[in-house]
Amino acid sequence: MSVELTRNFSIIAHIDHGKTTLSDRLLEYTQTVSQREAQAQHLDAMDLEREKGITIKSHPVTMSYQANDGKTYKLNLLDTPGHVDFSYEVSRSLAACEGAILIIDAAQGVEAQTMANVNLALEQDLAIVPVLNKIDLPAADVDKCRQQLEDILAIPGEHGIPASAKMGIGIEDILEAVVKLVPPPPENPDGLLRASVFDSLYDPYRGVISYVRVMSGKVKKGDKIKLFHTPNNYEIKEVGHFTPKMTKTAELQTGDVGYIIANMKSSAEVKIGDTITHREKPCLEPLPGFKEIRPMVFSGIYPVDTSDYEALKVAMGKLQINDAAFSFSTESSTALGFGFRCGFLGLLHMEIIQERLRREFDMDVISTYPSVIYEVTKTDGEELIIDNPTYLPDQQAIEEIREPMVRIFIMVPGDYIGDVMQLIMEKRGELENTETIDEFRVMLTGTVPLADILVDFNDRLKSMTKGYGSMDYEHAGYRAAKMVKMDMLIAGEPVEAFSTIVHRDKAQGRGRELAAKLKEVIPTQMFVVAIQAAIGGNIIARESISAMRKNVTAKCYGGDISRKRKLLEKQKKGKAKMKAFGKVNIPQDAFIKVLKSGD
């Protein structure tokens, strides 16, 4: 099929606005998937995606559509995630397209993530096809959504296509708009092969499968290829399209989205965003790269059974190949043994990776409390980057600690503005701007430390706004703050697994909370055990575990009281001696209970 009849487009939207349902209807309408094979959330291949009702990985599919002008078009669709943690997936998919279908829930209107995704699409200079979905709902207000398209996104309101993906309304209008508004892929006159790798997958039998968009030239089985970021050369074993299963074809040409299987055996051999070209006639420079992916949240992941360390390392390598934002390096802990320091985009990303390790690789893992990257200037002028509290220098050697900040954009109904402002202030944030979107909703812009929005910010926002609040955030540099390292001492010994970097004003509350949790899980000893939270030499919180008491006077049935006193005195001396020399062995399950409750 000629390049003129090819259209590459993505579907972008806020989470839960109906992207996956619309892609199901498009597959059915174009008869890409037969009625017998059709199932809900067809492109969500992972069990996790189906259970949580979210898209985690972008899924490409090639459809054939006969338009009203009588021509048959090849439509390459890339379904994208909507959650803020997976915006890197969206940017990669958009770089492989010429257009995007923007879905807006007709009942909820424009949300924070809708605006973020539109900005990503405009940066890539894509044609936008706005769709007003869920018009079958009683609460749908199409006129208000058209007005929001104009006021907020500067898209003419009449361009919005009313549709219901669930009921199958407006599907033909959407396909016709894609054919008319999305331009065909541009051709490069030199004809050299340039294929951009936008995703990859590891198959134990076939090795590495690269998902590619061919920008120029052709590629077929037997071609010798090379990548710009790896020194090796490869031979192509198979090429094909997604329909949505992998379907072998003779070749991929300009504008095609498909897969390439070459003789790549290791996950490190392909880099997301790399350019594939012919070995004999290479293009001179790689295609412009994707948005740089930077982990925002770090956590230690350890196998519960230390003998699983090597298996966990292999599992993480395989996960990393089709999740470029996930990074890991080895580390060890006296409490938890050998494990890995892992970088994630956010808390949902961290939860998904842990769940995939458990399900896909049958690994039983424990993770430490999530932390972020701090920049530290020492008194001698040395600059350090710290992602683990263990490596933070002593307090007296530190000149300044800078913590990562994020700019948050929160869209809420006007009734809840006071509660949300209170939440931002509680999280040490600053409100910068309040903007009225329409008669119902307000957009709040502020700056908040990343560490403070990690754990429960989004949950609390959803709770206090009865589910109507939505947020998006972007990295906003670093700012100096009064951060300190808080150690947990058990019987006077610091336990590094529980060390955290906290703001000085919040250290006492966090210390008390952690000490109370430890008191519940550490077994009773023969002597009193002190659990203390300390900053440097200062104790800021304390709990005590009472000693196990043996009744040493049980054998004294009578006689003088001094006999009992003598036995009690002897026990008292023994306990004092035990306290001086005794060690508290913290069982593995105690670490697991405390760290899991901290997630």
Image (cartoon, grey):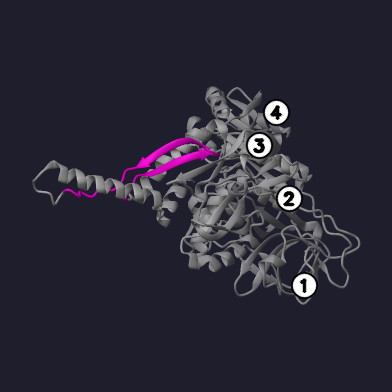
Task: Point out the stretch of residues depicted in magenta.
Answer: 526-553
- Residue 578 appears at what percent x and percent y? 35, 51
**Image quarter for residue 12?**
top right
Q: Nearer the viewer, mark 4 or mark 2?
A: 2
The residue tagged 2 is 292
Q: Earlier in the sequence, mark 4 or mark 2?
A: 4
Left or right: residue 187 compared with residue 596:
right
The residue tagged 3 is 406
The residue tagged 4 is 151
Q: Nearer the viewer, mark 1 or mark 2?
A: 2
Q: Is residue 498 above or below residue 111?
A: below
Left or right: residue 573 compared with residue 419:
left
Q: Residues within 10 Å of mark 4 (few under 14, many from 20)?
A: some
Say which of 2 and 501 sits in front: 501
Q: Earlier in the sequence, mark 1 or mark 2?
A: 1
| Mark 1 → mark 2, Cα distance in angstroms | 30 Å
- Residue 65 appears at what percent x and percent y? 68, 57
The residue tagged 1 is 220
